[in-house]
Image (spheres, rainbow, N blue to C red):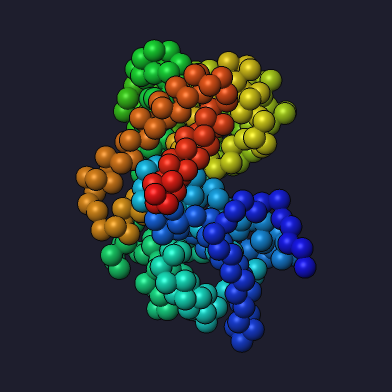
Amino acid sequence: MVFSCDAFDSHEEVVFVSDPACGLRGIIAVHSTVLGPAIGGCRILPYADDTSALRDGLRLSRGMAYKAAAADVPFGGGKAVVMADPSTQKSPELLRALGRFIDGLGGRYITGEDVGTTAADMVEIRRATPYVMGMPEEQGGSGDPSPRTALGCFVGIEASASHAWGHSNLPGARVLVQGLGNVGFNLCRLLAGAGATLLVSDIRREVVDRCVDAFGAEAVHPDAVIDTPADIYAPCALGGVINDRSIERLRVRVVAGGANNQLEELHHGDALRSRGILYAPDYVINAGGMIQLAMERLGRDREETERRVRNIRGTLTSIYRIADAENVATNVAADRLVERKLQSRSAAAAA
Ligand code: NAD
């Protein structure tokens, strides 16, 4: 049989797992262990078919490898995808069966939470394997990663402001935060503390009111976000917000926020660049939570975790320099930074 999948990118190892007794059907994809064991969450979704699940696993594990490498943590990227409806088909037996397969990889892949899984599920998987991160705090885990994701976004916004205007002073800067959930609300707190003027939007009225009351923010209707003038737009809700329909309408100088997959397509990074809008690559600026989990895994303290999250500022600055020097979009520059890092490590290992 000829194997063909557009998401295949020289992944080191892809394992199909099945246990009919508990209904487990899944795929564990390890993109790379060049920098260390592959980390990445376990996603449980009722995929339309096996090919969709495979493509998702391949794409997400590659994404994790790039994220970990950009963040300078000694880990590679992986992902587990399970083809099941988490609300009806997820069971302790299924989670433990998956744990046994993960255990069989001998530590080359370490799982964690993702769409369709919770910290409680990690406790169940932990019964079958030690290769799990993101345990609940009372069981030695490092707790909610969102505040660290928000901190990374905050220092990333400072780095972006610095590159765009030559200074990272936020007082007076108008920052438009879309999505006031775990990441967005914490980001608003940090921005307000730095003296930024906040414009906030969410489809949940109560969280908007909370930001207006707590930080003196101005509310923006969810349908008006893209057309609202601001200095910085921080997407912290959904992916795909930078697309053919939004780019021409944006009235901002910087896009820097925590949402995953902000560019609908990779070429939208070029489109932003042509409009003179500086884009902070999402997987770099939103890596704070992943850094926390990586540090939890390594048994490092809060101080080191925070220092490494703050390093996102320096990483973004390097990416902006590469983008300028090589005349490419910032998302391309980020990928180049990572690919050079992986190549030089592979070459050093082979020597
Ligand atoms: P969350 O679910 O807590 O918050 C998302 C918020 O966006 C909610 O308040 C929701 O009401 C709002 N929202 C949804 N649609 C909206 C719309 N059209 N307009 C305005 N607001 C809308 O999620 P989160 O944990 O804060 O994560 C936010 C984003 O950051 C996601 O894309 C997530 O994948 C990404 N991310 C999160 C983390 C983390 O540590 N939580 C880490 C990396 C990336």
Q: Is residue 172 above or below residue 55?
A: above
Question: Is 110 drawn above or below residue 59 in the view shown?
Answer: below
What residue occupies the far front of the structure in this picture?
A: 351
Residue that appears at 41% across and 59% down: 37
Q: Is residue 175 left or right of residue 270?
A: left
Q: Residue at x 56, y 19 (%)?
A: 327
Q: Quadrant of the N terminus?
A: bottom right
Q: Nearer the viewer, residue 260 or 226?
A: 260
Could you say which is closer to the camera, residue 285 or residue 137? 285
Count of labels in the image: 0
- Which one is nearer the viewer's eye here, 156 or 184? 156
Tell me which residue sits at (67%, 61%) in the image. 53
Q: Position of residue 284 (x, y in %)?
A: 46, 38
- In this rendering, is residue 108 above or below 76? below
Asked whether 128 or 254 is in front, the reply is 128
Q: Is residue 157 left or right of residue 311?
A: right
Residue 291 % position (x, y): 37, 48
Q: Position of residue 113 (x, y in %)?
A: 47, 60
Is residue 237 visible in the rendered image? The answer is yes
**Residue drawn at (41%, 68%) of the image:** 107
Residue farthest along the top direction in this orientation: 166
Q: Residue furthest bottom?
A: 21
Query: Residue 309's spot in the image, x, y percent?
Result: 33, 40
Q: Quadrant of residue 115?
A: bottom right
Residue 198 visible: no
* Quarter holding residue 50: bottom right
